[in-house]
Image (tube, rainbow, N blue to C red):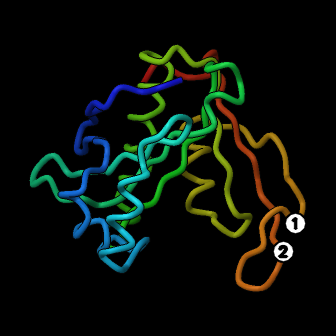
Amino acid sequence: MELKKEEILGKRIFLKPLEQKDAEAYSNIGRKKILSEAKKFISSSWKKDSYYFGIFLKENKELIGEMELCHMNWWFDKAGEICYFIKKEFRGKGFATESSKTMIDFCFKKLKFRKVYADTDPDNLASQKVLKKLGFKLEGKIREKNFVKGKWIDEYDFGLLKSEWKNGS
């Protein structure tokens, strides 16, 4: 599935495909700290089956995070995975929840998905709380899936079916 570049509006935020003009701000959100790395990443951030959106505040257009929508072709264009990252000083203020809700609405209403899924590190309790608040169910644990900081860690997989989604409420 190929996505058309468009803005997706939430209440306090909007999601917009990353552009080169966002590179400096992107280098300051805590992911790609070097400007040249940010520019390189942005140039490849919109490709079939992996689309990165910036999370921007409506009030001042500040970039506060990123939202990825990916792995859509794994399930015949009827499901996709969301991943999110919020700049440290904006965490704990509902932006991960709002950004995810905004993307989920888009996936179910516009893209006609039947399922949205996400995975977390077992220690990422904040992310698990966001997913559970949005209605996701823990579907499984994949043991020692990722090698992080010199050790193998598990992955928790969460899913939300369209039939479980409260139509954007």
**Position above or below: 124 against 112:** below
Q: Quadrant of residue 22?
A: bottom left
Would residue 96 be visible to someone looking at this image?
Answer: yes
Does residue 111 appear to the left or right of 29 in the view shown? right
**Do labels 2 and 1 touch, CB within 8 Å?**
yes
Does residue 46 appear to the left or right of 48 in the view shown? left
The residue tagged with tag 2: helix, strand or loop? strand
- Position in image of residue 2 (x %, y %): 47, 26
**Please, what is the three-letter code of the amino acid marked with disc 1?**
Glu
The residue tagged with tag 1: helix, strand or loop? strand
- Position in image of residue 64 (x %, y %): 29, 61
Residue at left offset 52%, top offset 14%:
112
Q: Quick one: 67 or 132, which is closer to the camera?
A: 67
In the picture of the structure, the residue carrying the numbered disc 1 is 144
In the picture of the structure, the residue carrying the numbered disc 2 is 152
Does residue 53 appear to the left or right of 48 in the view shown? left
Would residue 116 be visible to someone looking at this image?
Answer: no
- Position in image of residue 159 (x %, y %): 69, 35
- Position in image of residue 90 (x %, y %): 32, 66
Residue at left offset 38%, top offset 64%:
40
The C terminus, quarter of image: top left
The N terminus, quarter of image: top right
Residue at left offset 41%, top offset 73%:
32
Q: Earlier in the sequence, mark 2 or mark 1?
A: 1
Q: Quadrant of residue 39?
A: bottom left
Residue at left offset 36%, top offset 56%:
42
| Disc 1 packing (10 Å; few <14; some 14–19; many ≥20) | few
| Disc 2 packing (10 Å; few <14; some 14–19; many ≥20) | few
